[in-house]
Image: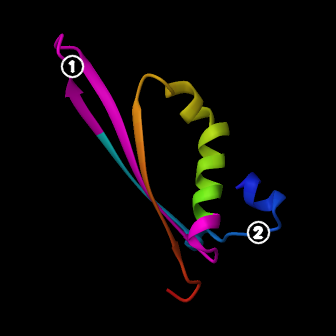
Amino acid sequence: MRLSREEGLKFADEDVEVTAEIGLSRNDAGNFLLSAFLNIALRGVNQQKAEELVKAAHKICPYSNAIRGNVDVGFTISARDKEA
Protein backbone atom coordinates (compact mmCIF):
# COMPACT_ATOMS: atom_id res chain seq x y z
CA MET A 1 0.00 0.00 0.00
CA ARG A 2 1.73 3.08 -1.24
CA LEU A 3 -0.28 5.33 1.05
CA SER A 4 0.79 3.41 4.14
CA ARG A 5 4.45 3.53 3.13
CA GLU A 6 4.21 7.30 2.74
CA GLU A 7 3.10 7.42 6.39
CA GLY A 8 5.89 5.12 7.54
CA LEU A 9 3.61 2.12 8.01
CA LYS A 10 4.40 -1.37 6.75
CA PHE A 11 1.86 -4.15 6.38
CA ALA A 12 2.67 -7.81 5.84
CA ASP A 13 0.28 -9.83 3.67
CA GLU A 14 -1.34 -11.33 6.76
CA ASP A 15 -2.02 -7.83 8.14
CA VAL A 16 -4.54 -7.02 5.41
CA GLU A 17 -7.71 -9.04 4.91
CA VAL A 18 -10.30 -8.17 2.27
CA THR A 19 -13.49 -10.02 1.46
CA ALA A 20 -15.44 -8.77 -1.54
CA GLU A 21 -19.09 -9.38 -2.33
CA ILE A 22 -20.36 -8.53 -5.80
CA GLY A 23 -24.08 -8.03 -6.27
CA LEU A 24 -26.21 -8.09 -9.39
CA SER A 25 -29.67 -6.54 -9.40
CA ARG A 26 -32.04 -4.78 -11.78
CA ASN A 27 -33.22 -1.21 -11.84
CA ASP A 28 -36.78 -0.03 -12.57
CA ALA A 29 -36.13 -0.26 -16.32
CA GLY A 30 -35.02 -3.89 -15.99
CA ASN A 31 -31.36 -3.14 -16.69
CA PHE A 32 -28.69 -4.95 -14.70
CA LEU A 33 -26.80 -3.08 -11.98
CA LEU A 34 -23.63 -4.12 -10.22
CA SER A 35 -22.72 -3.38 -6.63
CA ALA A 36 -19.68 -4.19 -4.54
CA PHE A 37 -19.23 -4.48 -0.79
CA LEU A 38 -15.79 -4.82 0.77
CA ASN A 39 -15.07 -6.08 4.28
CA ILE A 40 -11.60 -4.77 5.10
CA ALA A 41 -9.53 -5.55 8.19
CA LEU A 42 -6.14 -3.97 8.86
CA ARG A 43 -3.88 -5.19 11.64
CA GLY A 44 -1.48 -2.88 13.44
CA VAL A 45 -3.37 0.43 13.23
CA ASN A 46 -6.26 1.95 15.16
CA GLN A 47 -9.77 2.29 13.71
CA GLN A 48 -9.35 5.92 12.68
CA LYS A 49 -6.11 5.23 10.80
CA ALA A 50 -7.63 2.14 9.12
CA GLU A 51 -10.56 4.22 7.87
CA GLU A 52 -8.27 7.00 6.66
CA LEU A 53 -6.06 4.58 4.73
CA VAL A 54 -8.95 2.72 3.08
CA LYS A 55 -10.78 5.90 2.08
CA ALA A 56 -7.59 7.43 0.66
CA ALA A 57 -6.82 4.23 -1.25
CA HIS A 58 -10.36 4.17 -2.66
CA LYS A 59 -9.77 7.66 -4.12
CA ILE A 60 -6.67 6.64 -6.09
CA CYS A 61 -7.42 2.98 -6.87
CA PRO A 62 -7.62 2.41 -10.65
CA TYR A 63 -10.50 -0.06 -10.21
CA SER A 64 -12.42 2.39 -8.02
CA ASN A 65 -11.82 5.16 -10.53
CA ALA A 66 -12.99 2.95 -13.41
CA ILE A 67 -16.32 2.10 -11.77
CA ARG A 68 -17.01 5.30 -9.82
CA GLY A 69 -20.50 6.56 -10.61
CA ASN A 70 -21.48 3.27 -12.24
CA VAL A 71 -21.21 0.75 -9.40
CA ASP A 72 -22.32 1.30 -5.81
CA VAL A 73 -19.45 0.43 -3.46
CA GLY A 74 -19.79 -0.05 0.28
CA PHE A 75 -17.27 -0.85 3.01
CA THR A 76 -16.89 -2.14 6.49
CA ILE A 77 -13.49 -1.25 7.86
CA SER A 78 -12.04 -2.69 11.03
CA ALA A 79 -8.73 -2.33 12.79
CA ARG A 80 -7.26 -5.30 14.58
CA ASP A 81 -4.49 -5.71 17.05
CA LYS A 82 -1.30 -7.27 15.59
CA GLU A 83 -1.76 -10.34 17.82
CA ALA A 84 -5.39 -10.94 16.76
Measured from the top left, where is residue 46 in percent x and y? 61, 74
Separation (CA) of disc 2 from disc 1: 42 Å
Decide if residue 36 is on the left or right side of residue 7. Answer: left
Quarter of the rendering occupied by the N terminus:
bottom right
Would you identify the image quadrant in which residue 5 lies? Answer: bottom right
Measured from the top left, where is residue 7 in percent x and y? 81, 62
SS for dot 2: loop
- N-term mark: 2 or 1: 2
Q: Residue at x 59, y 49 (%)?
A: 55
Would you say residue 48 sits in the magenta stretch?
Answer: yes
Q: Residue furthest bottom?
A: 83
Nearest to the observer: residue 11 or residue 74: 74
Residue, disc 2: 9
Would you say residue 1 sits in the magenta stretch?
Answer: no
Residue, disc 1: 27
Q: Residue at x 55, y 89 (%)?
A: 83
What number is the disc on residue 65? none
Would you identify the image quadrant in which residue 15 lies? Answer: bottom right
Q: Which residues are magenta?
A: 23-49
The amino acid type of the residue labelled 2 equals Leu
Q: Residue at x 21, y 29 (%)?
A: 25
